[in-house]
Image (cartoon, grey):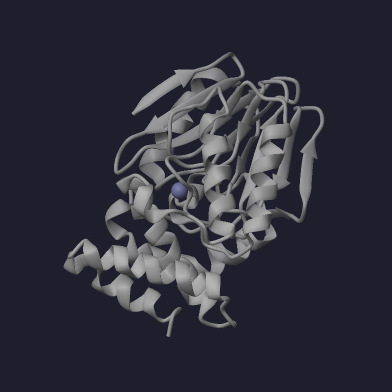
Amino acid sequence: MEIKQLSERTTIISFDDPYLTNVGVIFAANGKRVFVLDTFLGSESMAIVRGVIADQAAEDWPVTVFNSHADYDHIWGNGTFCDSTIIGHHLCRERVLSESAEAIVKYAQHKRGTVEIVPPNFTFGSALAFPKEHIIIEHTPGHTVDSASLSDTEGRLLFVGDNVEPPVPYVNTLDFDGFLNSLRGYLEQDWDYLLASHCPLMTDYLLLNANIRYLEQLKNWEYDIDSARLDEVHIHLHNLDSLSSLLITRPRSEEVKRHFQLAIAYAQSLDDSKMDGLLSRIRRVVS
Ligand SMILES: [Zn+2]
């Protein structure tokens, strides 16, 4: 775990157990308010965040939590702040309420301390602003339908949750245009620091542009599995697996079927029994 103070206003806590995840803390002195960006895996992780807040903020500064989306690794520490305002898109609240019981069983080994499921208690639709604190929150669907991003225009930091991810993002919806729109919006915003949840802090556009290229290829079912790097293909197959459940409920174009045929051939060539479940699920798209 590493605590990096970017400025008096911004601290990034990078957890590495069980995998790299960043939690941002913004000390908005202009509004005498602290913002916590996502809450990771439970009370143990958030005790560290509480310590950082106690060191740098006056006791009477309220803490406002922002949930970038409802996936478990972004909300399991909400219980530490159950008396605070917890902001999330209204679909984030719905997802926390409907998906958490299953997630807490499925990812039980990832709990760090106590996990109390607390959904956002302050929801929004398209955007929300804290003008005094120079914080703007926007619905930026992409990785998931409820994904949202937080821009700190004074600290020049843009936090995007899992919408940007190395080497390519995990895609859980068929709204590829919506995802591209969110990512292209990040290109137009004025920031010095781009913070995504699961990679080191960025100061350039390289990964953002690479993620955009991937989504453009995915959108047209033109992603070239045979010439891509193994770590990319691994996530791509994971994405096809997630998307297969959505695709089987609707008519599929020839391009979709052709792409899935290529993916099936690739997965078969790996000759790995761990692929059996994935293969049986993605085969439904071509049948
Ligand atoms: Zn995540």
Which image quarter holds the C terminus? Answer: bottom left
The number of numbered discs placed on residues in the rendered structure image is: 0
The image position of residue 226, as x and y in percent, is 35, 53
Which residue is more in the foreground, 229 or 56? 229
Q: Position of residue 112 (x, y in %)?
A: 33, 46
- Write the residue at 37% across / 78% down: 283
**Furthest residue toward right:** 131
The residue at 56%/78% (across/down) is: 252
- In percent of width and height, residue 68 lies at 58, 47
Q: Please tell me which residue is depicted at 52% across the width and 37% down the height of the picture.
A: 196
Left or right position of 115 against 5: left
Q: Residue furthest top?
A: 8
Residue closest to the eye, 258 or 275: 258
Q: Is residue 46 visible?
A: yes
31 or 74, which is in the foreground?
Answer: 74
Res 254 → quadrant: bottom right
Q: On the rendered structure, is 153 left or right of 117?
A: right
Looking at the image, which residue sits at the far bottom? 287
- Asked if residue 213 is positioned above or below residue 258 in the image, the reply reads above
Q: Is residue 121 among what the camera can see?
A: no
Q: Residue at x 41, y 56 (%)?
A: 236
Q: Quadrant of residue 51?
A: top left
On the image, the x and y values in percent for residue 46 come to 43, 38
Q: Nearer the viewer, residue 9 or 168?
A: 168
Instruction: Look at the image and tell me in which quarter the N terminus lies.
Output: top left
